[in-house]
Image (spheres, grey):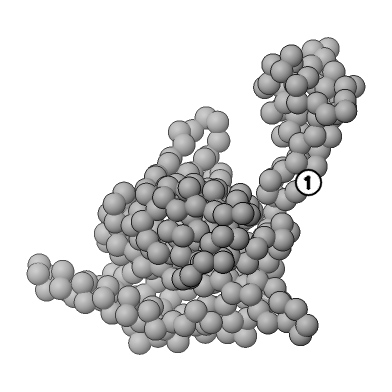
């Protein structure tokens, strides 16, 4: 974790209204991922938003495994994938049509809206906790001008949990060229009192209200929290000089904000030669011959760009039952 408050998720609670939230601040982690592929700026920014949302949403769950956010549409960006392990390793990539993107950039109007860049399609969330557990997946149409709005739509339609989300992804100004990418995100959720638990600690909530008065107070608290959150400027979410805790205090101190231990985040791919070997072993041997070019099967990780090569001898070894 950076000493300056980068590459982390800070859980928090607004005590006055018993609302829980997460603040994500990403520096080198998001810059390493989006810069590795030299994406065009609209693609890099949209992928940065997907990564930030994945980090925020994963931080709100209790799981041991991998949380994945994926978009698929018929726009210039065909596919985006961002995933986060329960240990905080994050990665992501995008597939896009360069010609379609160039036509979009040459035309009128803003480029970075979801309907124009992603088109019609879906947003999916997946939690995979291993081969012996059932995978959870939620899918919703891409409905919104931004990915954050699409997430709002998901929670309204699928989870019926009131959620507020802000995301900002910016490329910092450099001396002679564009500087590094930075990202930040803020999420608050309104959950039933029985669900209010953060990092294993039961969250306190106000007592002494009854019936309709309690409901009205909760509703007022929720609206107030959304109003306070909306006062956060995009630049504040990404400002390296503004510590995450300082930002939370600035926004919610009048209602009492309590923070919990941070979760560090790091750009880290999970690809390995062993993983690729297992994939190749799952393919019928006679079909592997069609994948070879100049006597070698080459596999490139879409996330990090690492290349793995297997010649005839390596393939023979994969299917040698005497050593497996």
Q: Quadrant of the rendered structure where residue 241 is?
A: bottom right
Q: Residue at x 60, y 60 (%)?
A: 102
Question: Mark 1 — residue?
Answer: 306
- Left-right relation of 316 to 239: right
- Looking at the rendered structure, the secondary structure element under dot 1 is loop
In-front residue for pair 233/144: 144
Does residue 69 sit above or below 277 in this rendering? below
Viewport quadrant of the C terminus: top right
- Left-right relation of 224 to 294: left
Whether residue 98 is visible to the viewer of this picture, yes or no, is yes
Q: Residue at x 34, y 64 (%)?
A: 163
Image coordinates of residue 271 in percent, x first then y, are 72, 42
Q: Residue at x 32, y 75 (%)?
A: 226
Does residue 71 sit above or below 294 in this rendering? below
Does residue 49 sit above or below 219 in this rendering? above
Q: Residue at x 39, y 45 (%)?
A: 139
The total of numbered circles placed on residues is 1
Image coordinates of residue 245 in percent, x first then y, are 52, 80
Image coordinates of residue 144 in percent, x first then y, are 37, 61
In-front residue for pair 203/13: 13
Q: Quadrant of the rendered structure where residue 174 is?
A: bottom right
């Amino acid at each position: 974790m950076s000493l300056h408050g980068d590459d982390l998720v800070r859980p928090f609670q607004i005590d006055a209204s018993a609302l829980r939230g997460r603040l994500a601040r990403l520096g080198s982690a998001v810059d390493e991922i989006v810069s590795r592929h030299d994406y065009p700026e609209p693609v890099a920014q949209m992928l940065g938003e997907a990564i930030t949302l994945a980090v925020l949403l994963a931080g709100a769950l209790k799981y041991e495994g991998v949380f994945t956010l994926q978009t698929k549409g018929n726009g210039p960006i065909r596919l985006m994938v961002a995933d986060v392990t329960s240990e905080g390793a994050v990665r992501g990539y995008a597939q896009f049509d360069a010609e379609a993107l160039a036509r979009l950039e040459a035309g009128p109007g803003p480029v970075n809206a979801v309907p124009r860049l992603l088109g019609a399609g879906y947003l999916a969330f997946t939690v995979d906790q291993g081969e012996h557990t059932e995978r959870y997946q939620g899918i919703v149409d891409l409905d919104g001008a931004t990915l954050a709005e699409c997430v709002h739509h998901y929670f309204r339609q699928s989870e019926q949990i009131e959620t507020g989300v802000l995301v900002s992804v910016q490329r910092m100004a450099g001396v002679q060229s564009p500087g590094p990418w930075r990202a930040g995100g803020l999420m608050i959720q309104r959950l039933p009192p029985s669900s209010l638990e953060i990092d294993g600690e039961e969250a306190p909530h106000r007592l002494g209200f009854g019936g309709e008065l309690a409901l009205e107070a909760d509703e007022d608290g929720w609206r107030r929290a959304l109003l306070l959150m909306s006062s956060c400027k995009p630049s504040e979410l990404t400002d390296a000089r503004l510590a995450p805790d300082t930002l939370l205090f600035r926004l919610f101190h009048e209602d009492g904000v309590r923070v919990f231990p941070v979760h560090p985040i790091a750009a880290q791919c999970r690809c390995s030669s062993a993983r690729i070997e297992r994939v190749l072993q799952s393919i019928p041997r006679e079909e592997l011959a069609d994948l070879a070019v100049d006597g070698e099967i080459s596999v490139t990780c879409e996330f990090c760009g690492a290349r793995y090569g297997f010649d005839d001898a390596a393939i023979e070894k994969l299917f040698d039952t005497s050593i497996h």
